[in-house]
Each structure stands twice: as C-alpha cells, then as structure tokens.
Image: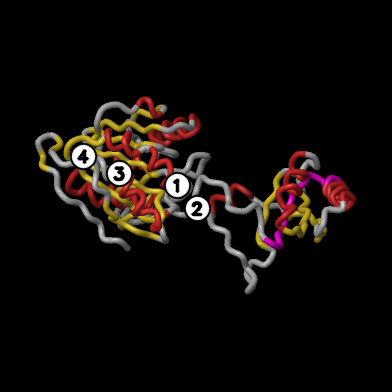
Amino acid sequence: MTLYELVLRAPEAIVEAVSDALMDELGALSVSVEDADAGSALEDAIFGEPGLPAPRGGWQRSTLRALFESEAEGKTAASRLAAEGSDGLEVASLLPVADTDWVRQTQSQFAPVEITPRFWVVPTWHEPPPGASIAIRLDPGLAFGTGTHPTTRMCLRWIAHRAEATAPRWPRVLDYGCGSGILAIGAGLHGALHIDAVDIDPAAVEATRANAAANGVALSPGAPGNASGTYALVLANILATPLKLLAPLLSGHVAPGGELVLAGILERQAEELTAAYAPWLELGITDAEEGWILMTAQRAGAVGGVPAGASRIAPR
C-alpha cells in the first residue's frame, strides 16, 4: 500500500492545534514535527528530560509531516486546513511515500550497545559482538530502558564494575521504577540473587517480566508496594523530582552495608539531590556522561557479615 505524506510549514503558535486537527479530525495515520531550520544557522535546539513533555510544542518555524492512506485524504486535509485560514500555515507538498521495509528500517536504528568490553546490550536481531561474555538481549518497547540513554548505561556500568568485587553481597536487589527491567536483568546476570523490580506502570511490569524471562533471569516484578524490607542494592533510574520525593522511602530500603544507585539526574541537580538524601545517606557523584550524572551512597554496616567499603567509578 502506498502512503501519502502531507508536508506543512507552521509557526510555533499553531503547531499543536494543527497536529491535533490532523490526527483527531482529518484522518492522519501519524504526525511528526521538526525544526524547519534544522541544519542551518537558525536551528533551534529544544531539550527536555526523558519522560517529561517537551518544553515547547514546536519551533518558531516548524515542519509538520502527516501520513495518509490515500492521496484523496491528504488533499482533503490540506484543503480544509487552508480553508480555516490558520495564520502562517503553508502547504508545502503532498507526495507518495516510497515503499519501505519499516521493520528493517526501525531495527537498523538500534545497534548493540557497549557497557564494558565484556558487557553489552544486544537487540535480538543482532549477534553479540566478539568478546561479549555477558549480553542483555533486549528489543525496544513501550517501557524506558534500552541501554541507549546515558543514565541507563551509567547504571549498568556501575553494576558491571561493582559486581567484580561485590556480587556475593547482593542477596536482595530492588529496581525501583524498573521500566523495561534492564537494570534488574543486568544485576541478575552479574550474580544478584533475589530481585524485586517495581514500577507504577503495568506495561513496564509486563515488559520486565517478559524481558527477564528472555534473558533467563529470575525476578519478582510488580507494583511499588511489592518492595519490602531492606536490600543490599537499591537502583532507581527515574528523574530528579521523583527521586527527591522518594528519598525517605528509597533510603529506608537500603540495608546496613547496602548501596543506593540513583540516575536520571542532570549535573545541575546534584546539590538538591544531595540535600534531599542527607538525613539518611551521603550521596556522591560516581559517574558522568553527556550532562547526566550517577549518584551513589552506601549505608554503614555490613551485609552478610561483609564490611562495607567505598565504591567509586571514574567519570568518563
């Protein structure tokens, strides 16, 4: 089936309204928005934190691309939008889209991700690279966590480095806000024993269950209320604001000698996270990548009779 792409130019003020009209009233299969000045000196970068809405709904000059099942539907949409006289809206083109193997094209965007030379995240349509003695087999899905984001890579890198000395000291692990389950699976592949993986999103819980089974890792996925008692390792890759609100809860789950690993934190947010956890634990920055940081803490005491020790991974 040949699809047709309607290309529009619009100022920022009407981008959301036009997008909504295309999807809700005019039958578009999809709508994408991009900077009309991308690649030029006028390019306008818009940054936001993962999981949160973009700071703005569009660019000062935005290009909208809407897909339709037929040329007639595309022409009707263009005519109706033009008739409404939206200020600054311009119809640029309506052209057929070449037949594409969308599955293959999507897969090509996800290559194996190196965590360490021995530890990789590998989509199922790739073979693990030579030298990858540990591989998480994981395909992109609805839940956050594929190894491509710096926060996920830093957490997995911490697990890999720390496991060399401490995996026997991880009798219980909690992955709070597990998403795809990638951190819980990474801990399991590095010797962790009982693992609780919890999330407020039922889709994330099911994704974690399926991904863990595919990797041969036994864990207990569920809602946050399933987390109970204390753990030798508590992982939370969320965002700074919920991490601050969860400070007493997450700190309370860290066993004597246990460790807390937090991610989803921008460099400028380090001080506020440190202050939020100060009544319970002393956070420090143990890794940094692309403006994101990894913060960890260790509770005094011992896990299973093994004294607690310092842990630091050199930022890279």
Q: Amino acid at mark 1?
A: Thr
Q: Distance of mark 3 from mark 2, alpha carbons?
A: 36 Å
Magenta-drawn stretch contains 165: no
Closer to us: mark 3 or mark 2? 3
Q: Eyeballing the image, is 192 above or below 62?
A: above
Indicate the position of residue 276 as horizontal and vertical percent values: 33, 44
Query: Where does label 2 land, which residue?
Result: 110
Please name whichever residue, 247 or 36, is drawn nearer the observer in this view of the structure.
Answer: 247
**One can see residue 93 in this view:** no
Closer to us: mark 4 or mark 1? 4
Of mark 3 and mark 2, the one earlier in the sequence is: 2
**One can see residue 173 in this view:** yes
Of mark 4 and mark 1, the one earlier in the sequence is: 1
Q: Distance of mark 3 from mark 1, alpha carbons?
A: 28 Å
Determine whether, in the image, residue 190 is placed left or right of residue 150.
left
Closer to us: mark 3 or mark 1? 3
Indicate the position of residue 112 as horizontal and vertical percent values: 43, 53
Q: Distance of mark 4 from mark 1, alpha carbons?
A: 26 Å
State which region is magenta: 60-73
Q: Distance of mark 4 from mark 2, alpha carbons?
A: 34 Å
Are the residues flagged by discs 3 and 2 in contact, CB closer than 8 Å? no
Determine whether, in the image, residue 309 is placed left or right of residue 43.
left
Query: Where does label 4 land, which residue?
Result: 258
For mark 4, give the secondary structure: strand
The residue carrying pointer 1 sits among few (fewer than 14), some (14 to 19) or many (20 or more) residues within 10 Å by Cα, namely many
Query: Where does label 1 land, which residue?
Result: 146
Of mark 3 and mark 1, the one earlier in the sequence is: 1
Q: Eyeballing the image, is 52 above or below 223?
A: below
What residue appears at the point 18 percent right and 44 percent down from the top-left corner?
166
Query: Where does label 3 land, which residue?
Result: 277
